[in-house]
Image (cartoon, helix red, strand yellow):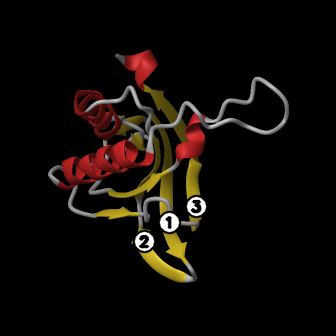
Amino acid sequence: MRFVIQRVTEANVKVEGTTIGQIEKGFVVFIGVSDDDTKEIADKMTKKMLGLRIFEDENGKTNLDLKTVDGQLLLISQFTLYADCKKGNRPSFIKAGAPQHAQMLYQYIIESCKQEIAAVEQGSFGADMKVSLINDGPFTIVLDSAEIM
């Protein structure tokens, strides 16, 4: 499982010109799922993401987590995080999870986050989405379950 986490001051996602998710201060999280991923891996990834202390405290140090700053979440499914670009110029996506499996884990992550964070918005699984965000910092973190497990 892979998460690309961007600390933002605001963000939104649109499908066919209609805004379906919008947040202010918080994280936009792009989520990639492989066939090897499980709910246990999702739990560990979610816990790690929610625990990241990447918001500034009163001294300007990145020392506060999302919940402490009353931050919001925008969760976007993105199978392209499993692009394999080793051969040629056209990426292969065979390492991405099968749609049914990926969607199940994506929804599981959304529900898990809703238990911890008051404002959780989401994209539309499998849709052609337009994501707009203002990256705060810029601050981007990549979490890969292969590296944190």
Within 10 Å of disc 2 (Cα), the crowding (few <14, some 14-19, many 20+) is many
Amino acid residing under circle 3: Ile
Label 2 sits on residue:
22
User: In the rendering, which numbered label is found on residue 95?
Assistant: none
The N terminus, quarter of image? top left
Label 3 sits on residue:
134
Amino acid residing under circle 2: Gln
* Viewer-closest of 57 and 3: 3
Separation of residues labelled 2 and 1 (CA atoms): 6 Å
* Kind of element beneath mark 1: strand
- Name the spot of residue 126 as percent of width and height, x first: 49, 59
Disc 3 and disc 1 in contact, CB within 8 angstroms = yes
**Position of 19 relative to 31 (above/below):** below
* Kind of element beneath mark 2: strand
Amino acid residing under circle 1: Ala
Separation of residues labelled 3 and 2 (CA atoms): 12 Å
For residue 57, say whether it is visible: no
* Kind of element beneath mark 3: strand
Separation of residues labelled 3 and 1 (CA atoms): 6 Å
Label 1 sits on residue:
11
For residue 121, say whether it is visible: yes
Does label 2 or label 1 sit earlier along the sequence?
1
